Image: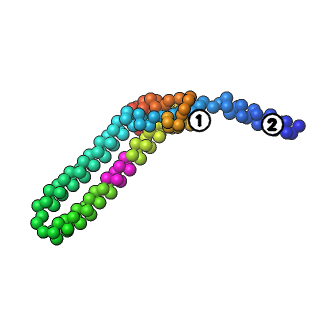
């Protein structure tokens, strides 16, 4: 009798959980990023820093060509390599920081959509073969509302 009662309880729990499940949402992260002005601005800042580094190297190349002795050229190369490494490190830190900020804002908006839509989970759209609910536009709306 106890086994029957336990089995009945387990079955009712399983069916109860399935009845309350709202489903799986999926998000096209790239689409959201492309339609999020903060992300667009972050990309512009990163690209600007990359162009700045390219211009730095062009300028240094011109300076290098004007040097007349091998010793001056060697010293110049070493100094330029150290300076470029510092610029490259700063670029990588900026890029990581901006990517993390964008990700955190998109994730926060997605979490709010998850709660509002009573979804069980949100996954990347490339994981879904059939079914699910596309929440990309809802997340874009949240981000455009200025809360993030």
Specify whether residue 99 is painted magenta.
no
The earlier-in-sequence mark between 1 and 2 is: 2
In the picture of the structure, the residue carrying the numbered disc 1 is 120
Q: Residue 44 occupies which quadrant of the picture?
A: top left
* Residue identifier under label 2: 7
Q: What stretch is highlighted in magenta?
A: 91-98
Residue drawn at point x = 71 percent, y = 31 percent? 15
Q: Would residue 146 be seen by someone viewing this image from the given angle?
A: no
On the picture, is 66 further left or further right than 124? left
Labelled pair 1, 2 in contact (Cβ < 8 Å): no
In the current view of this chain or complex, which residue is farthest to the right?
A: 1
User: Residue, x 10% and y 66% (percent of image)?
Assistant: 68
Left or right: where does residue 70 sit relative to residue 92? left
SS at badge 1: loop
In the rendered image, the vertical position of residue 128 relative to residue 102, given as above or below: above
Q: How crowded is mark 2: few (under 14 residues within 10 Å), some or many (20 or more)?
A: few
Residue at (41% x, 47% y) in the render: 100
Q: Nearer the viewer, residue 74 or 146?
A: 74
Query: Where is residue 43, by image quadrant?
Result: top left
């Amino acid at each position: 009798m106890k086994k029957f009662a336990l089995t009945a309880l387990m079955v009712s729990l399983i069916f109860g959980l399935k009845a309350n499940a709202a489903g799986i949402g999926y998000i096209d992260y790239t689409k959201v990023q492309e339609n999020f002005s903060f992300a667009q601005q972050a990309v512009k800042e990163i690209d600007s820093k990359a162009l700045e580094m390219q211009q730095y190297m062009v300028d240094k190349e011109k300076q290098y060509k004007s040097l007349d002795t091998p010793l001056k050229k060697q010293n110049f190369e070493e100094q330029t390599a150290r300076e470029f490494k510092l610029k490259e490190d700063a670029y990588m830190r900026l890029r990581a920081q901006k990517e993390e900020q964008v990700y955190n804002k998109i994730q926060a908006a997605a979490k709010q959509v998850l709660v509002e839509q009573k979804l069980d989970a949100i996954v990347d759209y490339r994981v879904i073969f059939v079914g699910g609910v596309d929440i990309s536009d809802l997340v874009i709306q949240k981000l455009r509302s200025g809360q993030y």
